[in-house]
Amino acid sequence: MELLEKVKSAQDNSERRKLAHEVVKLFLHSNGRATNDQVSVFGEVLCRLLSEMAQSVQVELANQVCDSCGSPLDLVKALAFADDVEVAEPVLQRSKQLEETDLIEVANKASTEHRLAISKREHLSANVTDNLIKFEEGVVMQSVAQNETAKISSNGFSTLAKNSETDERIMQALITREDLPAETAQHILDHVDADGKAILDQLVQSDSTLLHRLIKKSQRLTEEGKTDDNPDRIETVALIQQVEGGHRSLEQAIKLLAEQSRLKSIATMMAWAANLPEEEVNKGIVNIKGDFLALIAGALELSFEVYALIDALRTSQLRIPSNDPNKIFDQYDQLDPDHARVTLRMVNVIVKVS
């Protein structure tokens, strides 16, 4: 420990910088073998010398300290509060020695970059995320919402939901969170403005299950405690969950239902997949003309084979003559899926307004 004593008494700045580098090397090479007293002295001296160290040395020290549970606590805290976020980040993200109160203090006193570093930490408490979210900084809110291990309070979710109306990343992260409260899901659906609707529409186009999840979560408010005793519907919902989980394709699921002559269940499946009211889809696919069935099947990009199965089931249940296979093939083959989807969205708007 002679070197440590030498550092304490050094007056010349250049000598202190040189000794600081040597102390850091000595500390890093001690590799947990130092006694408690030695660790305490290391912490005291290193805290004194932080300002004398080159940035690269500070970063190296922070990366060593952040994964240890026996580092000098004063040093850990000093690194966490470092103005240079590259120095503070490893400690803020990974050090298990920092308490909740330490994280909250940094969140309230340091910069956006420091809050962003904290937001990426695993298993954050709701108290910490509240103190991150309250500044309403876009990048920090996005990161908190994307952190699946972070706990978020009801107030935190409310603030995130409000900001999601104009921030696509926050909205997408919220919709995919398993712990999204029903009240927050309902808020997003009820209060989203024109810009928010455009964002939600883009998200739905990239992942058709997102809106379904959001609506499903909002329905907990009115459906809590209720059960559906209809075995056919329960089975259909289970089939939807298989499609949603990637265990079965939409094409496979609808083909199975068609082979079982379950036209109403097909309507339920199509309504879910197309984000349309189930009652309207059910009415549409049993229409004598069959135009709506072709439109929704085309929008969902179902194969002609599956479309023909549904059409045959439809004509059978309506007791009307079957369509000529060659004729409906030509009609279906000429249907543009993108145009069909645009038409369906217009239908959905009309239904909501009426």
Image (cartoon, rainbow, N blue to C red):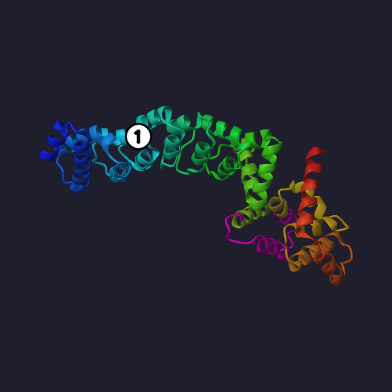
Q: Which percent across, then down, holds residue 350? A: 81, 42
Image spot of residue 44 (x, y percent): 20, 33
* Secondary structure state at the residue bearing disc 1: loop
**In the rendering, at what x and y percent does residue 160 appear?**
56, 34
Amino acid bearing label 1: Ala
- For residue 59, which quarter of the picture? top left
Q: What crowding class fits label 1: few (fewer than 14 Cα within 10 Å), some (14-19), or many (20 or more)?
A: some
Task: State which quadrant residue 116 falls in.
Answer: top left
Q: Residue at x 18, y 47 (%)?
A: 30
Q: Residue extending furthest bottom? A: 326
Residue range (magenta): 244-269
Q: Nearer the viewer, residue 270 or 314?
A: 270
Task: Determine if residue 1 is in view.
Answer: no
Is residue 235 found inside the magenta-colored segment of the image?
no
User: Is 260 colored magenta in this rendering?
Assistant: yes
Q: Which residue is mark 1?
A: 82
Residue 297: image quadrant is: bottom right
Between 143 and 21, the one nearer to me in the picture: 21
Q: Residue at x 45, y 43 (%)?
A: 149
